[in-house]
Image (cartoon, rainbow, N blue to C red):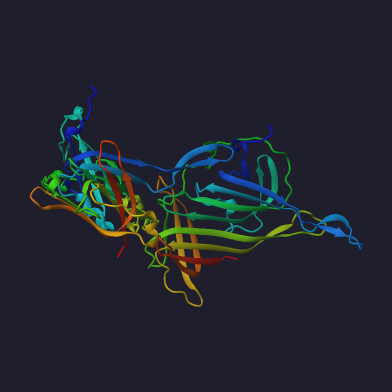
Amino acid sequence: MAFLKYEDVVITLGNEKIFADTAGISVDASVAESRNVYGEIERYAPTNGLRGELSFEYYMTGAIPSYLNMTGIPDTDTRNGAFGGLVFTDAYARSYNLEVQPYSPVKISSAVDFYSALTSSISASSSSPTDLPYWKNQYAHGVRSYVLGAPSNINSTLSVSYSVSAARRPIYLAGETSPTRVTKEAVEINMSLRGDNIGDFLLVSGRHAEITCHMLDMNTNTTLDKLKCSGQITRQELSVSPQNYLNGVISVRQVFQ
Amino acid sequence: MKNASLPYNQQVYVNGTGISGIQSIEGNYGITEQNVNFAGFGYVTGLISQPMQGNFTISRALVSEDPFLNLTGDGTDFAFSGSVFYERPNLGGTLDNTEGNYMSGCFGFHSGYLTSYNISCGIGEVPSVSVAISVYGDLGPGIDARYNKGEATADNPAIQVPNQGGIVLTCDGSSTNRITSFSYSMELPRTALYALPNTTAADLTADSVKWKMPAQVDLSYPVESTANFTMEIDDYETKNLYGALTGIHIHNTDITINNDSGGQIVKFDLTKSRLISESFSSEVGGPVTVNLTYKKYSNKR
């Protein structure tokens, strides 16, 4: 079989199959040309280890999975994974973001870095979600999800954006091509609310906000997760356009580490 | 036995008022779904991905004051409900739908907004009205739009059939040329703004409808009104096409429909409307006619 179909490509991270809607994987080798004194290229030499990225979008079918947890687990937590039969190791979550809008299902865009080569070979496989023990058939949806903690003069919230990101830096020992450790730095949560107002006016030091977005299953009213951002409002904006409404946006930033 | 629900035993109500002269009524809704697919498996389910809205269209003969004309405005005060009751022959074949005795079928809507209004008439006809309604609330069976749910007698409008002499039309050349038909339409596009629920989980559990409905429904301005007159020519002369380059022709047009005793049923004022098209036609066996189309745009204020 020359080309695998969408239905034949299973993505795994740690022990969990990812219910990905779309996914991609890439690996970059950092190489630079080495020149001799005459300016001629002698060879290409690595300047850093391999760095790969697994990116995927999936419908939020439960709590944020542990493999994307960047705020509650140590930076040594690492996972292996597979993508369509190709295997990688030393994977670390780098970012995820989502947007909650009225009457829309919630989709999460995630990125995971890995610091290994791809091994094995592409092969067809399949996995029925209903056969998996962690399958719940629940979907976070904007028709029920709601926000608590928005500034009091924002009466209607039109959408919420939420993102968590971390910078990853691999540490290599001399003579090693795999990192001995990958640090987790600059972890921060950003949340922005679009609504009919912008809250109290900003001070020079920002303004504190504690906002929680309760992610609810669209059918059963079950809370799947609570996405919190407790930090400073760093930006307020207002905009208007023809045939449209005055919209206000507030952006809240919480630094974790 | 399989029977049929026939139109002679049906009633239509809008905002508590029984409507006479209904020629047709049609209601529908559609749900937009987004397919959920998983890599390594394929299609799993569909999730609602657009606000749930419905549409109704009603056409009627203008045989009384038109209740829809009071519903062309902006804001929640102009939201209305409606329902059609129809007999269900196997359940007694009556329209009795009082509490505990639901014999008739009912198909209706909550929170509807008028999105277009059309009226037209030709010589020898009763004016006909058709309206389009966007529904932002629930739609389907069991929605009772009768006055006090039918427990009290509604103050339904009296039947007033307009005759030809009671229709007064004014446009360019109307004093010396014969208008044989007219139509008038108002486009009333609505914008619904949906917000996330900001209520507590307890309210959501209560399955209240408030978080399913739009936070705001507004009229999108400008409102476009179009009047169209067909005239048999005596002394009317059309305008030059290139004449529009030196200024669109602006006229006051007016449509008034009175009942047989001279009382006004409806009136449409298109002061300073813009002549945007003319068509000239002549054929064997008929007089020369022109068709004039005027438009007027109205802002919020």
Q: Which residue does the image show at 16% across and 42% down from the upper left? A: B20
Residue placed furthest toward the top = B1
> Horizontal placement of A88 versus B116: left or right?
right
Q: Quadrant of the N terminus of chain B?
A: top left
At which x and y percent is residue B242? 40, 56
Residue B205 to residue A132: above or below:
below
Question: Quick check: can you spot residue B156?
Answer: no
At which x and y percent is residue A115? 71, 53
Label total for image: 0
Question: Quick check: can you spot residue A96?
Answer: yes
At which x and y percent is residue B26? 28, 39
> Horizontal placement of B159 versus A231: left or right?
left
At which x and y percent is residue A133? 53, 40
Residue A191 to residue A90: above or below:
below
Q: Which residue does the image show at 9% across and 47% down from the upper left? A: B260
Question: Considering depth in this image, is A26 or A254 the residue closer to the camera?
Answer: A26
Question: Considering depth in this image, is B265 or B108 the residue closer to the camera?
Answer: B265
